[in-house]
Image (cartoon, grey):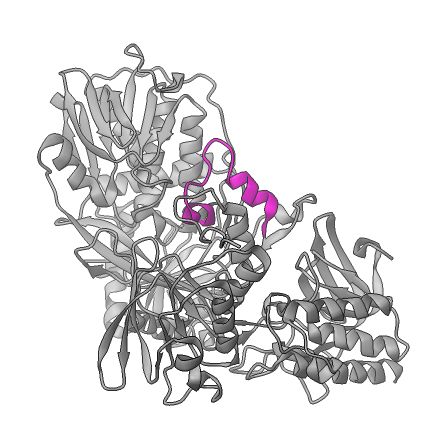
């Protein structure tokens, strides 16, 4: 064991289980508050579960359950993101969103949406008629009837944000252990000894942010769980960058009880997407796509945006939401055992994570933890991947363009493979650089990428060289 | 001139150094137009033939049979012997009205104004995603382009026993590549009643020892991490499970036309190619397109070479007007 792994009983050691967006944000907040944070992730890299696939929207909370913890965390997360995004070099695309009604029945429900939004303190909502909608969104089908415009719903980078959070935690005394699945543990009244894939880890407090596996971690360590994860899959279709100019804002449907419904939205990477579905399933890691659903999404997209007809599809994927048997966030405290579980955090998690982190900090203080916030925390900006801001290729000395579709440079790939939080898997490298995520999906760059990453990952892109 | 960053204007800018681009450049040069810049984003010139490590290339245009890489080298040698300027690692980022093109290189960005611009950006295969194929997004799923560049350029294999989808000319090329690299496909799938190329793919089972399944398509790809199996269904509804460690999607070509698509140029509806007249001229008369970026279905290198020559002549006539 190296020095870093030595347990310091004086410091406030806190273990965060799970390297999704919630775990990364919690790790950041607690590290900045002066705790010695250890993030434990069972995969070889962060964002391997629910946080791998979401709609990348920074929500205002206009449609959250009023006065709920979710609403509070979303609002706090929204304003916190606006506060820190510049110093962390995290992008923000001020698109706005509209809840669009396509039928008379949907139109009749817009007043409820408006009322709820106003009750939720989102005061800048605007009711738009068809002409006003088409002025903002000239490519939208004229079948649209009316909409509520939400100016402060924005688009962000869903992978760089958590990366920046964890990187800042690491730069402020924290650490991250990968391939470190938590399989059990003992509590002596003051400290936890967690059994992990990387050996024993000691901590005064444990925050379970294991997302899709949150209930299983509680069962493995505490013996039982207060909720059950009901995985809910969402499939997406990503259109070519040429489709980006077809919409300006996020086009939301009038929501039903169960889900926000199928959304048309621009991505920070310069694409346009349709999704997600909401499919209950048993598998916690079954992110498979299916032909019929993808066809349905394409048809829905086409109905709202007729010019999608000639637009090529770049990618398809599915994300899995860690839903539970109830709709609300499941924040479960066990103060006697110094344990907090953050469960049931679904699509609002990307926005809410920073607010949830503040909430956890407060709960820990209530449990008796004392923090001495860092006076001058280290700020660590991350590389920009947003299409509307200068990318690495615009600066000379990049070596070569490895991925032409997404314009990923050799310099970017080398940086992502080294440093404090290097990519631990191919998908981790893709999320850090966008390599192979473009329209050709690796037709041109797989070989070079395989060469550059040979001997780097457990699952390589290229099998070992053939013997001569 | 040795650096494109020093170049602010030229007679003809050719984007792409594959057979089409080189043929057009040589034709123009022969006709007395010498201020030509050939731009390619790759680190090596020659285009797709560079990673098709098997014959027959060159029969039609050079009267000799070569492997793809030898053919690519031969073309580039001819271009260099003719004194043509080739700028590699140069990515065109924007086409503007009137022939102004923006580009980036590892040494910096630039812009040049060409009297005529030829788009010879070629084609690529449709990836799994755009085909809406069901199942897991596992490792080991790729196109022939990725397979061949991995094998011929990097000596790496993406899989050991893949399922092959498609029966076009390129599928045959893929099977040859597999055979040469010691990769043993488990089956070839074709959705239609007949293979797309009749001979010798219908003999594939005998030639390559690989069973061919007609009127068969993928139900789902399975694999946690790497591909583990593929379920298929045939016309009679029979479901089969193929144990494999990869899926090779061959053919189903689509023009590599994103530069045109993101520009002011009109696109030909339903093809993904820039709209051209019978001389290869685009909606902005300064722009031309030739070769596989406009061909549907895709054509072999020799036909692209021929088209490059024809469009080269058209540009020449146009410039002389």
**In the figure, is residue A353 to the left or right of B78?**
left
Instruction: Name the spot of residue A208 as percent of width and height, x first.
Output: 23, 33
Q: Residue at the spot x=35%, y=68% of the render?
A: A146
Residue B207's image quarter?
bottom left
Instruction: Name the spot of residue A211 as percent of width and height, x first.
Output: 24, 42
**In the figure, is residue A448 to the left or right of A324?**
right
- Which stretch appears magenta? A408-430
Front one among A185 and A263: A185
**In the figure, is residue B296 to the left or right of A322?**
right
| Vertical placement of residue A41 versus A466, above or below | above
The N terminus of chain A: image quadrant:
top left
Q: Residue at the spot x=91%, y=77% of the render?
A: B32
Q: Is residue A186 visible?
A: yes
Query: Could you tell me how many numbered marks the image carries?
Result: 0
Instruction: Name the spot of residue A460 as percent of width and height, x first.
Output: 43, 49
Front one among B109 and A5: A5
From this viewpoint, which residue is outermost toward the front?
A468
| Vertical placement of residue B77 versus A450, above or below | below
Instruction: Name the spot of residue A120 as percent of width and height, x first.
Output: 27, 46
Residue A425 covered by magenta stretch = yes
Residue B243 covered by magenta stretch = no
Front one among B26 and A336: B26
Residue B112's image quarter?
bottom right
Q: Is residue B307 visible?
A: no
From this viewpoint, which residue is outermost toward the top?
A10
| Vertical placement of residue B231 versus A17, above or below | below
């Amino acid at each position: 064991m190296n020095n870093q792994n030595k347990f310091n009983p004086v410091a406030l050691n806190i273990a965060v289980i799970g390297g999704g967006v919630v775990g990364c944000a919690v790790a950041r907040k607690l590290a900045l508050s002066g705790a010695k944070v250890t993030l434990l992730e069972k995969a070889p890299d962060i964002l391997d579960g629910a946080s791998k696939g979401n709609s990348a929207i920074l929500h205002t909370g206009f449609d959250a359950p009023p006065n709920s913890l979710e609403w509070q965390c979303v609002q706090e997360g929204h304003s916190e993101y606006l506060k820190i995004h510049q110093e962390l070099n995290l992008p923000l695309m001020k698109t706005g969103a509209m809840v669009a009604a396509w039928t008379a029945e949907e139109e009749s429900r817009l007043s409820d949406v408006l009322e709820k939004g106003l009750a939720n303190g989102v005061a800048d909502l605007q009711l738009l008629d068809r002409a006003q909608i088409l002025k903002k969104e000239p490519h939208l089908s004229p079948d649209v009837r009316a909409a509520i415009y939400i100016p402060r719903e924005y688009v962000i980078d869903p992978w760089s944000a958590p990366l920046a959070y964890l990187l800042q935690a690491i730069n402020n005394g924290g650490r991250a252990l990968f391939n470190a699945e938590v399989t059990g543990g003992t509590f002596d009244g003051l400290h936890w000894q967690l059994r992990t894939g990387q050996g024993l880890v000691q901590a005064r407090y444990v925050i379970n942010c294991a997302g899709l596996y949150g209930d299983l971690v509680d069962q493995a360590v505490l013996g039982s769980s207060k909720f059950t994860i009901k995985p809910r899959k969402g499939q997406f279709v990503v259109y070519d960058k040429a489709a980006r100019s077809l919409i300006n804002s996020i086009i939301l449907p009038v929501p039903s009880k169960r889900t926000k419904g199928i959304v048309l939205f621009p991505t920070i990477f310069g694409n346009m997407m349709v999704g997600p579905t909401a499919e209950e399933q048993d598998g916690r890691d079954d992110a498979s796509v299916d032909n019929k659903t993808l066809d349905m999404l394409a048809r829905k997209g086409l109905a709202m945006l007729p010019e999608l007809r000639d637009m090529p599809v770049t990618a398809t994927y599915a994300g899995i939401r860690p839903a539970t048997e109830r709709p609300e966030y499941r924040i479960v405290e066990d103060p006697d055992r110094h344990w907090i579980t953050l469960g049931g955090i679904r699509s609002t998690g990307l926005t809410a994570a920073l607010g949830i982190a503040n909430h956890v900090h407060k709960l820990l203080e209530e449990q008796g933890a004392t923090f001495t916030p860092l006076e001058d925390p280290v700020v660590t900006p991350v590389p920009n991947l947003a299409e509307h801001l200068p990318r690495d290729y615009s600066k000379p000395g990049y070596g070569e363009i490895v991925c032409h579709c997404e314009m990923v440079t050799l310099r970017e790939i080398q940086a992502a493979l080294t440093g404090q939080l290097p990519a631990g898997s191919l998908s981790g490298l893709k999320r850090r650089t966008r390599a192979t995520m473009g329209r050709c999906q690796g037709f041109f760059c797989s070989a070079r990428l395989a060469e550059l990453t040979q001997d780097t990952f457990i699952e390589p892109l290229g099998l070992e060289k053939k013997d001569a | 001139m040795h650096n494109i960053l020093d170049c602010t204007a030229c007679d003809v800018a050719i984007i792409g150094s594959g057979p089409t681009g080189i043929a057009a450049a040589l034709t123009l040069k022969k006709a007395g137009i010498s201020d030509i810049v050939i731009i390619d984003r790759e680190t090596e010139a020659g285009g797709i033939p560079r990673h098709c490590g098997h014959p027959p290339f060159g029969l039609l245009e050079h009267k000799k049979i070569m492997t793809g890489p030898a053919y690519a080298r031969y073309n580039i040698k001819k271009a260099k012997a003719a004194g043509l300027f080739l700028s590699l690692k140069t990515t065109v980022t924007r086409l503007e009205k009137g022939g102004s093109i923006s580009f980036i290189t590892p040494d910096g960005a630039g812009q040049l104004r060409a009297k005529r611009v030829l788009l010879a950006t070629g084609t690529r295969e449709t990836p799994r995603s755009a085909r809406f194929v069901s199942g897991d997004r596992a490792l080991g799923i790729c196109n022939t382009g990725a397979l061949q560049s991995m094998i011929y350029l990097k000596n790496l294999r993406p899989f050991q026993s893949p399922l092959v989808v498609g029966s076009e000319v390129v599928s045959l090329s893929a099977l040859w590549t597999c055979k040469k690299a010691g990769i043993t496909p488990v089956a070839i799938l074709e959705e239609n009643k007949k293979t797309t190329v009749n001979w010798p793919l219908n003999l594939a089972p005998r030639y390559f020892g690989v069973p061919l399944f007609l009127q068969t398509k993928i139900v789902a790809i399975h694999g946690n991490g790497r591909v583990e199996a593929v379920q298929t269904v045939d016309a009679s509804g029979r479901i089969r499970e193929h144990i494999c460690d990869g899926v090779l999607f061959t053919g189903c070509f689509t023009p590599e036309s994103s530069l045109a698509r993101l520009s002011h140029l009109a696109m030909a509806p339903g093809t993904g190619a820039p709209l051209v007249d019978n001389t290869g001229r685009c909606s902005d008369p300064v722009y031309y397109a030739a070769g596989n970026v406009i061909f549907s279905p895709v054509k072999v290198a020799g036909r692209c070479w021929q088209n490059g020559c024809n469009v080269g002549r058209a540009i020449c006539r146009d410039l002389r007007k």
